[in-house]
Amino acid sequence: MSELSASQVMEANQFEFYFDGSIYVFGFKRPATSGFKYLNVLQIQNPAAAEVI
């Protein structure tokens, strides 16, 4: 997690982050699933890489 950068949550159920120069996007099929829980973990592990948009 310390190597992730520029992570964000889009539309509440999509979690995006950059790793090693590539972007990775996790979208969740269930609308009730929130990408914010993943962002919260990253904010604890690597606060400089996490932002909420």
Image (tube, rainbow, N blue to C red):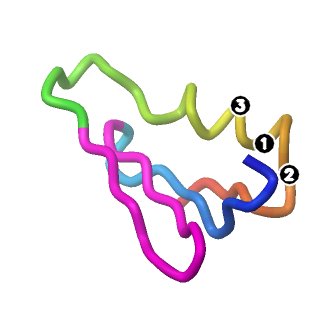
Mark 2, residue position? 47
**Residue nearer the viewer, 39 or 23:** 23
Mark 1, residue position? 43
Span shown in magenta: 13-27
What amino acid type is highlighted by mark number 2?
Pro
Marks 3/1 in contact by CB < 8 Å: the verdict is: yes
> CA separation, marks 3 and 2?
9 Å
State the image coordinates of residue 29 (x, y, percent, origin top left).
14, 29
Q: Residue at x 78, y 42 (%)?
A: 43
Q: Residue at x 81, y 53 (%)?
A: 2
Q: Is residue 39 above or below residue 33?
A: below
Which dot marks residue 41? 3
What amino acid type is highlighted by mark number 3?
Val
Which dot marks residue 31? none
Left or right for 46, reference 9: right
Which residue is situated farthest in the bottom direction here? 21
Q: Is residue 38 magenta?
A: no
Left or right for 16, reference 18: left
Question: Which mark is first along the chain, 2 or 3?
Answer: 3
